[in-house]
Image (cartoon, rainbow, N blue to C red):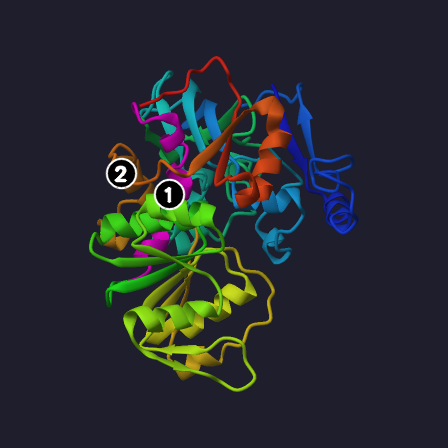
Amino acid sequence: MKAVLADITTARYLMTAAAQKVPRGKGKGAGWGPGGLLRYRTDQPDLALPKADGWVRLRPELAGICGSDVGLAHAKLSLVLSAFYTAEQQIPGHEVVAVVDDIGPGVTRVSPGDRVVVDPIVSCFQRGFDPVCRTCADGFPYICERFDEPGAAGCVAPGQGFDAALGGGWAEQLVAHESQLYQAGDIPSQRAVLAEPASIGLHAALQWERRGDRVVVIGPGTIGLLTVAALRMLHPDLDIIVLSPDAFGSAQAKKAGATRVLPSGPQTVELLAESDGGRVLRPRMTKIPILEHGVDAVFDCVAMPETIDLAMHLLRPTGMLVMVGGAGKYPVDWSLVWNRQLTIQGTINSGPEPSLDSRTTMSQVVEWLGDPGYLVDAVVTHNFDLPDWKLGLEAASAGPRAKCVKATLRPNLDIPLVTG
């Protein structure tokens, strides 16, 4: 089969990381350049179904290019997290809408020809472990303690898109357990492919138990826009303020349901005090003032040192900072956390939610994706055929410079896209 394959051995990863520091021209030092960790294969072996009940083979219709895929391509992922992502080869692509191609023994939920979206997390249940780990037993399978243990799935990573054993969306096929699949029906392809990141946006939004009427979302990228869209569906009257670095991001944020958009940076404190009231406190020898009478929650979908710092300066006492972006090893002054009794809440993946009566966020967003009132049509901006995967990565890496929010790849041209 045709596939984009990542060789993530330590040597190849470090070589790609080092190449980022050398000026080489467009894409030359990145993972898709010469000697990089990504390559296109036309002879990748077809995938065998695991020798257990419930597994199916899928043919992707569309697959998204995620921020973590861009991080992989530039060798900028956290090495701490490599403890959970132990496969030395992977086929990227964990945001997938696909058609069921073949089913194995014991499959009852789907049939060949069904359109489905994929929850890519392979937890204890899919791996066949009994008893399951404590985290899965407690209702958090999306942060399973056995991501590095293959079990029946043969996967030594969190799931599809992170281990070539199960494949990923950047190929003509992948395999998944039927419990990971949700019927997509006639949802348009460019909406259906958002099911996985949209479930993450909803999971992030649900971390905040509403206490107030004003929140800030930092970053109008894919996850930022989908977090805005989820907050708007959950709280139609909420004042959602998006911080954007440019006019393109501002326009996309408005389309996703933002009440208003402000520039990101120290001036945000001044602007909010001016428009909404509140005192501005100015610490000595620091760049960012503190907003007294601050916002109730901040969803940081960028998670760089400057955005984390700004978020804490914007929050009212006892406010919540939801870390939606992938933070790394940063120098940040955490004084306001204890001084203002702030809550820092991490969030990742889709999963069962107590506030949804134990339904998953994926099941909820699949319902929403069929509703035009769920404002996500501005998210997918670029589509590329699989052989043009390098152009897709260039657009995704450029982001606002290429007027790109979400780029997708189309592996199987014989599968028609659904429009609506």
Query: Mark 1 and mark 2 in contact (Cβ < 8 Å)?
Result: yes
Measuring from the top left, give residue 69's x and y in whole percent. Answer: 57, 42
Q: Is residue 52 visible?
A: no
> Is-magenta flag for residue 198?
yes
Kindly identify which residue carries mark 2. Answer: 368
The magenta stretch spans which residues? Answer: 185-208
Measuring from the top left, give residue 201's x and y in whole percent. Answer: 37, 49
Indicate the secondary structure of the residue bearing disc 2.
helix
Tell me the kind of residue under disc 2. Trp
Q: Nearer the viewer, residue 107 or 312?
A: 312
Q: Is residue 264 above or below residue 5?
A: below
Q: Nearer the viewer, residue 313 or 132?
A: 313
- 119 sits left or right of 168 in the view: left
Q: Is residue 154 above or below residue 235?
A: above
> Is-magenta flag for residue 343?
no
Q: Is residue 357 above or below residue 92?
A: below
Q: Earlier in the sequence, mark 2 or mark 1?
A: 1
In what quadrant of the picture does the N terminus appear? top right
| Quarter where residue 354 is shown | bottom left
Between the C-alphas of marks 2 and 1, the distance is 10 Å
- 198 sits left or right of 89 in the view: left
- Secondary structure that dominates the magenta span: helix
